[in-house]
């Protein structure tokens, strides 16, 4: 009986696109840093879990304008810092623009 063997030769370049799934820690940080920044921050691949959406509502309470543009795609208009909220921040309350 003879042993089976594999032969390998040089292959071509590997090509394609890989999209990593959303990450909760990075999603929270994206919302917070975008809200602190001055101008527009666009986030793609945001993990849209309840706690990340609560962070988005809190950032709105601190003065950022946040809009969901599609699944995992968000636009954050930061004001260069936080404003004092007009009320107690209750992340359980829905905010305009997203659920």
Image: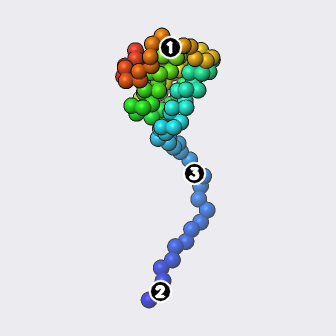
Q: Residue at x 56, y 21 (%)?
A: 35
Q: Residue at x 40, y 15 (%)?
A: 96
Q: CA distance from mark 1 to mark 2?
A: 77 Å
Q: Inspect this view and state whether residue 46 appears.
A: yes
Mark nearer the viewer, 3 or 1: 1
Q: CA distance from mark 3 to mark 1?
A: 50 Å
The residue pinned by badge 2 equals 2
Examine the image and state in which quarter residue 41 appears: top right
Tell which circle, 3 or 1, labels the residue nearer the N-terminal end. Answer: 3
Counting the numbered discs, the total is: 3
Q: Which mark is residue 8?
A: none
Tell me the SS state at disc 3: loop
Examine the image and state in which quarter residue 57 appears: top left
Residue 78 image position (x, y, % from top left): 58, 18
Q: Label 2 near label 1: C-beta < 8 Å?
A: no
Tell me the SS state at disc 2: loop
Q: Inspect this view and state whether residue 65 appears.
A: no
Q: Residue at x 56, y 47 (%)?
A: 15
Residue 81 image position (x, y, % from top left): 61, 18
The residue pinned by badge 1 equals 85
The residue pinned by badge 3 equals 14
Few, some or many C-alpha atoms within 10 Å of disc 1 (few <14, some 14-19, many ≥20)? few
């Amino acid at each position: 009986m003879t042993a089976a063997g594999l032969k390998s030769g040089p292959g071509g370049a590997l090509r394609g696109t890989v999209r990593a799934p959303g990450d909760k820690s990075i999603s929270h940080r994206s919302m917070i840093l975008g809200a602190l920044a001055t101008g527009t921050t666009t986030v793609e691949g945001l993990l849209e879990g309840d706690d990340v959406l609560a962070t988005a509502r809190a950032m709105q309470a601190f003065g950022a304008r946040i809009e969901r543009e599609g699944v995992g795609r968000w636009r954050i208009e930061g004001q260069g810092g936080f404003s004092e909220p007009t009320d107690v921040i209750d992340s359980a309350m829905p905010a305009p623009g997203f659920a």
